[in-house]
Image (spheres, rainbow, N blue to C red):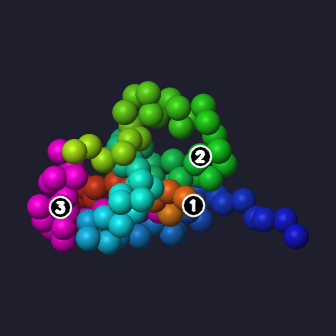
Amino acid sequence: MTEELPTQENLTKEIDTTSWSELAVHEERSALLMVDSSLNLAEVALKVALDDVESIKGWISHNLISRPTKDQLADFQASPTHKKFSFLIVQPYVLTQIKKDA
């Protein structure tokens, strides 16, 4: 039995919204990645799922994908339910963006 590859369309449908209080556990296990708002979250998730190392390295080198900074963490922890995040799970990672309307 072959595993079906994800598509950007399917991943777009899976994007969900949450608050920091739900994401904190993923940060604690170093699985949370912040995705810059200039990138399409579903596209990034697809590249991660397909192990597209070149795309991922490029985004990391331009600080478009990163672990949350200490300043971001302090801000998120100060008001864990105030900001809203879009997120997608691509095992073992949780990819997230701060919602623009948050």
Q: Which residue is mark 1?
A: 91
The quarter of the rendered structure image containing the N terminus is bottom right
- Picture disc at residue 43: none
- Identify the residue shown where x is 63% and y is 40%: 52
Closer-to-camera residue (46/10):
46
**Residue 11: % across, % down:** 55, 62
Compare marks 1 and 2 and give the one earlier in the sequence: 2
Q: Nearer the viewer, mark 2 or mark 3?
A: 3
Q: Residue type at mark 2: give it.
A: Lys
Query: Closer to the camera, 72 or 27?
Result: 27
Q: Secondary structure at mark 2?
A: helix
Spatial separation of the CA atoms under disc 1 and disc 2: 13 Å
How packed is label 1: few (under 14 Cα within 10 Å), some, or many (20 or more)? few
Mark 1: amino acid: Gln
Q: Residues within 10 Å of mark 3 (few under 14, many from 20)?
A: some
Q: Indicate which disc, 3 or 1, sits on the residue closer to the N terminus.
A: 3
Amino acid type for the residue under numbered disc 3: Gln
Disc 3 versus disc 1: distance between alpha carbons? 24 Å
Question: Looking at the image, which residue sits at the far front?
Answer: 29
- The residue sitting at 56% across, 35% down in the picture is 55
> Residue placed at 84% from the left, 65% from the top?
2
**81 in magenta:** yes
The percent coordinates of residue 45 (x first, y second) are: 53, 53
Mark 2 neighbour class, 10 Å CA radius: few under 14, some 14 to 19, many 20 or more: some
- Label 3 SS: helix
Q: Residue at x 19, y 58 (%)?
A: 76
User: What's drawn in magenta, residue-wise?
Assistant: 71-88
Q: Is residue 74 magenta?
A: yes
Q: Is residue 71 visible?
A: yes
The residue carrying mark 2 is 47
Q: Which mark is residue 77?
A: 3
Task: Tell me if label 3 and label 1 are in contact, CB under 8 Å.
Answer: no
